[in-house]
Image: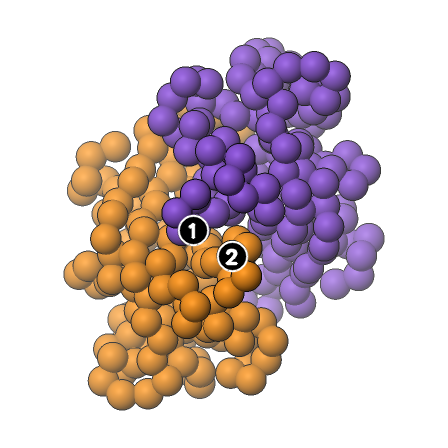
Chain colours: A purple, B orange
Amino acid sequence: MDADTARRRLAGARVGRLATVTPQGQPHIVPCCFALEGNRIYSAVDAKPKSTLALRRLDNIGAHPEVTLLVDHYDEDWSELWWVRVDGTALVSESGPRRTVALEALAAKYRQYRVSAPPGPVISVAITRWRSWP
Amino acid sequence: MDADTARRRLAGARVGRLATVTPQGQPHIVPCCFALEGNRIYSAVDAKPKSTLALRRLDNIGAHPEVTLLVDHYDEDWSELWWVRVDGTALVSESGPRRTVALEALAAKYRQYRVSAPPGPVISVAITRWRSWP
């Protein structure tokens, strides 16, 4: 897969899966909506900010800022399978200009966020590596 | 989501995403076909056994046997979203009865594996925790 195709597929995917590492060193994974803009991935924490679900992901990033996001396509014809993965360094923004930029990118991609902006923090990932298959 | 629904959704999903931790402590994630049988998840390494892609996943499990597998459903109606996640301890089998059991479970679920059995090692995950949402 060439770099343009990988970028187009990542940008267009409606859902990705974000993997992080817990403070104890165990893998963690959640599905998430996200937007790609330049060299960054933005994602909002949809769960209520104080909820266990939200805190786990944010705690993980606090302990281990290296994260990875996967998008993939499944088809019963296995010759049609593909995936794109980006590794990067994540930062959590509770407020401020970075959160505003992230919310704008997310609202541009998702009608659902234009109807109702996510109230919680956002995760920004500075991409350090692209991988794709095939 | 009740436990029966979570089990049914996990068992029926055609693709999951497996997250592992690299020897250096970074998160790694791949899409994978898998079968649920009893308290175990089985997955074959479809890539050629000596390939970099296969080795990475197997190396990660060698260093950190704790893994997590996610299945999720995306819908533009966000009230329809759900996910099921299982954490567990993974073991790689290059041959022997455990690999045979795994290949049988995978062949029972996937016609593609009945046509062509995967040649490489299998990953067995003993599930230690179920999580689901909502």
Q: Residue at x 65, y 51 (%)?
A: A87
Three-letter residue code for mark 2: Gly
Secondary structure of the residue carrying tag 1 is loop
Task: Give percent across and percent down for residue A89.
Answer: 66, 43
Q: Is residue B54 visible to us here?
A: no
Q: Nearer the viewer, residue A39 or B40?
A: A39
Chain label for disc 2: B
Mark 1 residue type: Gly
Residue B125 coordinates in the image, percent (x, y): 30, 64
Q: Residue at x 59, y 80 (%)?
A: B51
| Distance of label 1 from label 2 (alpha carbons) | 7 Å
**Residue that mark 2 sits on:** B25
Mark identifier at residue A34: none
Quadrant where the C terminus of chain B is found in the figure: top left
User: Along the line of sight, which residue is nearer the eye, B120 or B55?
Assistant: B55
Q: Please tell me how crowded label 1 is: few (under 14), some (14-19), or many (20+) other residues with Cα within 10 Å.
A: some
State the quadrant of the N terminus of chain B.
Answer: top left
Please, which chain is the residue tagged with disc 1 on? A
User: In the rendered image, which quarter is residue B108 located in?
Assistant: bottom left
Tag 1–tag 2 contact (CB < 8 Å): yes
Closer to the camera in the image, A108 or B20: B20
Which residue is at a point 23% across and 53% down the rendered structure image? Answer: B128
- State the residue at coordinates (36%, 75%): B92
Q: Which residue is mark 1?
A: A25
- Which SS class for mark 2? loop
Question: Residue B129 or A6: which is nearer the viewer?
Answer: B129
Residue B118 in percent (x, y) is at 43, 80
Asked where in the image residue A48 lies, by quadrant, the reply is top left
